[in-house]
Image (spheres, grey):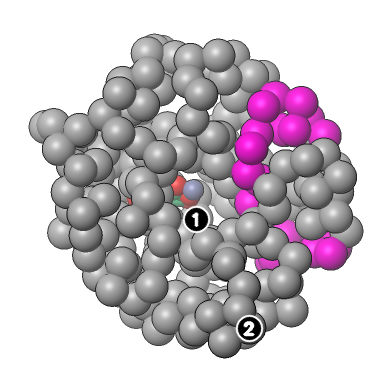
Amino acid sequence: MMIAPSLLSCDFASMGTEVERVDKAGADLIHLDVMDGHFVPNLTIGPAIIKAVRPFTKLPFDVHLMISDPLSYIDAFADAGADIITFHIEADSDTDKTIEKIKSRNVLPGVVIKPGTPAEAVFPYLDKVYMVLVMTVEPGFGGQSFMEDMMPKVSAIKSEIKKRGLEVLVEVDGGITVQTAPIASKAGADVSVSGTGVFKAADPALAIKEMKNS
Ligand code: DX5
Ligand code: ZN
């Protein structure tokens, strides 16, 4: 299991050193949550902050767009240093056009589904994406409880990927801790995003290690 700490739960006044901290603690990716106050009822960071923290690590930046019009902002996030850009298929932008736009910028594309969206909704895109992100909370806030009832979706997507001989990563996001990571792993998740589970842990390096081993 790969671990992507979500900066949403870090000390925002020291973002650069927080990134260095989780890099040293064994993170595989850095997860950055972008919210527009429209697609979700919260506002977070945009491309300027992502660009500012980019020099603090060589780890890939996994940028999760929770915004209504992702297509219009792909250039800005590519310029800011995103390595992976995931966006919601529930957003207003055309999904195929957004995937193509991300690829045209040499960034790896991924599609995200909210808890109410069925697994089958991502099937038409499996041969076009690097990653599928299955939300295990309603997007918008860190620190919510893991929705274990999303695991059948993770398994269904993973088995469809295998059935087609593809190598798409399945990521889960929301409520992942040392307790819940093994459940996600057993269901077939390859990558776990963890915000409070890493940044609020007494020992983030130990938390990452335990999650990785799950
Ligand atoms: C929620 C975000 C998550 C969030 C996870 O909308 O997409 O990445 O930061 O935080 P935890 O791990 O605390 O649930
Ligand atoms: Zn996220």
Count of marks placed on residues: 2
Q: Position of residue 52 (x, y in %)?
A: 59, 14
| Dot label at residue 139 | 1
Q: Earlier in the sequence, mark 1 or mark 2?
A: 1
On the question of residue 142 being in view, the answer is no
In the image, is residue 115 above or below residue 202?
Answer: below
Mark 2 is surrounded, within 10 Å at the Cα level, by few (under 14), some (14 to 19) or many (20 or more) other residues, namely few
Is the CB of mark 1 within 8 Å of ligand 1? yes
Question: Helix, strand, or loop for circle 1?
Answer: loop
Per the rendered image, the range of residues in magenta is 75-96
x, y (%) of residue 34? 59, 39
151 with respect to 133 (left or right) = left
Q: Amino acid at mark 2?
A: Arg
Tell me the tag on residue 2.
none
Q: Is residue 79 magenta?
A: yes
Q: Residue at x 64, y 51 (%)?
A: 86
- The residue nearer to you, when weighing 115 against 19, is 19
Which quadrant of the structure image shows residue 173? bottom left
Q: Residue at x 58, y 65 (%)?
A: 168
| Residue 152 percent across, percent down from the top left | 40, 83
What element does badge 2 sit on? loop
Looking at the rendered structure, the kind of residue marked 1 is: Pro
Q: Is residue 144 above or below residue 200?
A: below
Q: Which image quarter holds the C terminus? A: bottom left
Q: Residue at x 70, y 24 (%)?
A: 80
Q: CA distance from mark 1 to mark 2?
A: 29 Å
Inspect this view and state whether residue 30 appears.
yes
Which label number is shown at residue 164?
Answer: 2
Q: Residue at x 53, y 80 (%)?
A: 162
Q: Residue 16 vs residue 109: left or right?
A: left
